[in-house]
Image: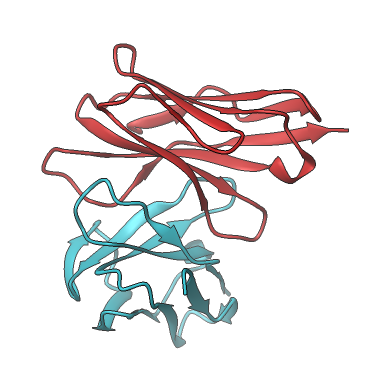
Amino acid sequence: DTEVTQTPKHLVMGMTNKKSLKCEQHMGHRAMYWYKQKAKKPPELMFVYSYEKLSINESVPSRFSPECPNSSLLNLHLHALQPEDSALYLCASSQERARGHEQFFGPGTRLTVL
Amino acid sequence: GESVGLHLPTLSVQEGDNSIINCAYSNSASDYFIWYKQESGKGPQFIIDIRSNMDKRQGQRVTVLLNKTVKHLSLQIAATQPGDSAVYFCAETDSGGGADGLTFGKGTHLIIQP
């Protein structure tokens, strides 16, 4: 299995809702990432998990809450989002946190906040 | 500003011609570079990578050139095909004390003319 899977593919939520995005990989990778991508823009790093511990939070608002239940799973919990949070949320994984390892991306979750 | 950028937002080439996509970076500590291809509605797909101790690397129909003197990276695609239509991003990480996530350039939209 050489892919990163993400669910759901699409998500529409109101500003008062609570929802979660899920990401899974079975490549034995120990580093997992969340990126946010707005339309016609490059992906921007949000969080990095290394060996199931949060190692980097790129000053992301607390309405985004990451969780890594085990080495294969990565969640992103969403609460009280704003319309400007609408974007494609990409999950990626790599062999380990050390630089120089290719990151494999999932297909993303297209999030719309009403 | 961004540490990695691109010269052209859109590149239009004839099918069968060679394509060259350019990228400039400003971080002298950058030591690992990746080119990704992103098709509409999909996550970024790895094309080829190069480390700073190399100046050229070849894959199947693709070549990446790295000029550290002028901090320039390019992706050459030989005999461009319709399936090559996508947005191409360069990305980098550095060996300094910064984040392990990737920093992406702005992206170039490659359009293949029949």
The outermost residue toward the left is B97
Q: Quadrant of residue B4?
A: top left
Q: Is residue A27 left or right of residue B89?
A: left
Residue at horizontal 50 percent and vertical 76 percent from the top: A6
Viewer-closest of B65 and A83: B65
Is A59 drawn above or below residue B69 in the view shown? Answer: below
Residue at horizontal 24 percent and vertical 69 percent from the top: A30
Q: Quadrant of the C terminus of chain B?
A: top right
Q: Quadrant of residue B30?
A: top left
Viewer-closest of B69 and B17: B17
Residue at horizontal 16 percent and vertical 38 percent from the top: B95
Q: Is residue A8 left or right of residue B31?
A: right
The image position of residue A95, as x and y in percent, is 28, 62
The outermost residue toward the right is B114
Q: Say which colour chain B has.
A: red
Viewer-closest of A26 and A65: A26
Is A85 drawn above or below residue A69 in the view shown? Answer: above
Q: Is residue B102 left or right of residue B75?
A: left
In the rendered image, what is the letter of the chain coloured cyan?
A: A
The image position of residue A59, as x and y in percent, is 24, 58
Q: Quadrant of residue B96?
A: top left
The image position of residue B12, as x and y in percent, is 74, 27
Looking at the picture, the colour scheme in use is: by chain
The image position of residue A56, as x and y in percent, is 19, 60
Q: Quadrant of the N terminus of chain B?
A: top left
Is B33 drawn above or below residue A51 in the view shown? Answer: above
Viewer-closest of A25 and B5: A25
